[in-house]
Amino acid sequence: MKLSLSSSPHQRVKRDTGQVMRLVIYAMVPGILAQSFFFGWGVLIQSLIAVTSALIFEGVILALRNKPVERTLTDYSAVLTGLLIAISIPPTLPWWMTVTGVFFAIAVAKQIYGGLGFNIFNPAMIAYVVLLISFPAAMSLWLPPATHAEVVPTFFDALSLIFTGFTTSGYDVTQLKTVADGVTMATPLDTLKTDLTQGVTYSESLNSPIFEGSIFDAVGAGWGWVSFAYLLGGLFLVKTRVISWHIPGSMIVSVFVCALLMHLINADYYASPLFHLFNGAVIVGAFFIATDPVSASTTPKGRIIFGAAIGFWIVIIRTFGAYPDAVAFAVIIMNMAVPLIDYYTRPRVYGKTVKGKARGRS
């Protein structure tokens, strides 16, 4: 019998970059379908626009840099970036804004640094922040979930909204946000942020139309199911060892603990842990964004610190900052801290003491 030897590390499952990216994309499918069900065809249309423009920008830049185009495009990293941008933006965002965000993600946040493996920031989150700062009004125009909408846009309505700003019947996004009794519906995070500034307590804010008919009292209608669908996809990635549990686990626990402490201090002003976890992008951020293998921490201890710090910043920025959601800002802040985290959490080399001296026999 012939034995074959291989050098460490010894991996039972070997996956190249393309396989890993494809598995992440497959894991996003339940969330994307749930998001499309509650918020319309615009989610799928934006996905097509974002992915197509990401591939075009990546291909053109690679050709200009004299880099292999086909091999890089087939690693699916540009596809994944496009999808992450598409699910983060309002489904009816004008097409040129989507393309602008994708350009910043691919050209500025990724290729300027040298391409995949060299970028220090998460490209999709850079795109989201650029769009949010540049077009704050447009980035807040989320339609009501289909269960609460007076008018549910058809596929052609969504297509027309994205490219012309109006449905085939002449409605604009602001008109479509109006539900029964002339109430204009915002997202759960926007609703709470606005109510608190007007002296409405947290418990009173939960009586808003966006929370009616939801699976939990503190979770906006539709948003809870979308978060749950992404949670299933995230657990699949952990189960198949595409990602480790350290970042999503510590991030979710951190959000829960920080929100709980603040809620116990003042339940009239600070939202509950359930509200923070299942409204907005915490779940998708924990499993699909913060776990980016390039811009995240790489050591086991570092990943726990990295995820916990993101969770802390999410609660702090949501509560005291100007923007309702904070996942993108929290991830980018901690991307900057990754070199420092990894430096101080490096595993000790076998045979060395903490100070780096050789361990001798006593």
Image (tube, helix red, strand yellow):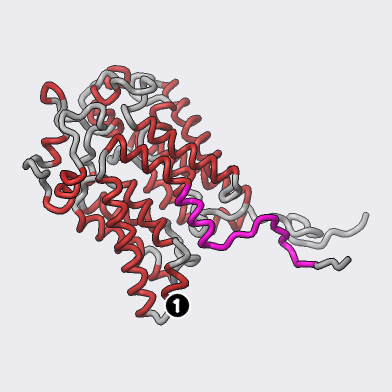
Q: Which residues are magenta?
A: 5-26
Horizontal side of residue 228 vs 43, given as left or right:
right
Say which residue appears at 45% left-offset and 70% top-offset: 72
> Residue 278 placed where, x, y %?
40, 32
* Quadrant location of the N terminus in the rendered image: bottom right
Q: Mark 1 sits on what residue?
A: 68
* Numbered circles on residues, count: 1
Say which residue appears at 71% left-offset and 61% top-offset: 9
> Residue 298 placed where, x, y %?
58, 55
> Residue 116 placed where, x, y %?
46, 66
> Residue 77 placed where, x, y %?
44, 61
Horizontal side of residue 302 vs 7, given as left or right:
left
* Quadrant location of the C terminus in the rendered image: bottom right
Q: Quadrant of residue 184?
A: top left
Q: Let me know if residue 324 is in the magenta part.
A: no
Say which residue appears at 37% left-offset and 48% top-offset: 329
In the rendered image, the vertical position of residue 316 relative to residue 102, given as above or below: above
Q: Quadrant of residue 239?
A: top right
